[in-house]
Amino acid sequence: MTGNDGIERRWTIGELAKATGVTIRTLYHYDEIGLVRAGERTASGHRRYTEADLRQLYRVRALRGLGLSLEEIANVLQRPADDLTAMRDLLGAQLAELELQSARMAQLKTKIGGLLGLLDRSVMPDPEHFMAALEEISVYETYFAQELRDHLAQRRMRLGEDTLRDLRTEWLVLLKEAHQHMLAGTSVDDPQVQAVTARWTAMAAALQSGDEQRDEQLDERMRAAGTAWWRDNSAGVSAEVSRQIEWLDADALPAIFDYLQRAVIWAREHESGE
């Protein structure tokens, strides 16, 4: 942008705002926080932006377009323009954040799909039933912190919808088999019950996040949150599940889970030789 006479062009703040589409207020803010400062001042103190300043503004706007915060942009601009490693690390972090947002959207999609399922089962849905579903979401968020909800969303993405559908099918099969054994009074140490228990445990293991220490800690927190959630809401959850499963009575689910838990405990004690 050097003129015919070899002199670089200068822009007033108003001219720069008009040429770039950035508001004057934003340019003042960028100047105040040190992102884009006018390279020169007139004798009367008015800002004059140079070509180097224009290139700096372009970098800021490009990084802003990638979703970086102004603080992150400042950190990037402190490094040399050709520091590819720093840029790669930053873009990797941004990609991870976008994947997390995608997981959250998938989780929200599941929740909305569940509510639509309620509507599909009734020509004129009961408002109390609809509100109860919304309250279940609120209760869920009370027990599971945002980090745990993000963890669940990421886990769902890693497993994929096909795997999750297979796990749900297997869950229903195992639930029904355990229910039948429980009604028949079959002892938890019976080989058939232990076979069901082994499949139940394997299914739970498939939902675990991995072997890394951080994931193990999150899994432990997840189990603790799930236990607290079930302890305080088992009656309402059981009633809702029983409405969707014909053969399941409203008060049967806690009894089935207790039966399976006793079977799991017996299996652990047996494996350890106690």
Image: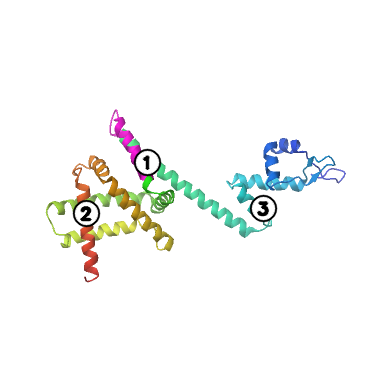
Q: Secondary structure at mark 3?
A: helix
Q: Is residue 103 above or below residue 273?
A: above
Which residue does the numbered mark 2 point to in the structure image? 258
For mark 1, what is the residue? Answer: 138
Amino acid type at image mark 3? Leu
Q: Position of residue 264 (x, y in %)?
A: 23, 60
- Circle 2 SS class: helix
- How many angstroms separate mark 3 from mark 2 (CA)? 58 Å
Camera-side residue of 173 and 93: 93
Quadrant assignment for the N terminus: top right
Residue 166 shows in the view? no
Binning the other alpha carbons within 10 Å of mark 1 as few (below 14), some (14 to 19) or many (20 upward) gives few
Q: Earlier in the sequence, mark 1 or mark 2?
A: 1
Say which label, 3 or 2, has the lower sequence index.
Answer: 3
Query: Which span of residues is magenta-colored?
Result: 120-141
Closest to the observer, 60 or 117: 60
Dot 1: element: helix
Picture coordinates of residue 240, whole percent (x, y): 26, 41
- Apparent side of residue 152 relative to residue 265 in the rendered image (left or right): right
Q: Is residue 23 magenta?
A: no
Residue 192 position in % (x across, y down): 17, 60
229 horizontally vs 84: left or right: left
The circle drawn on residue 122 is none
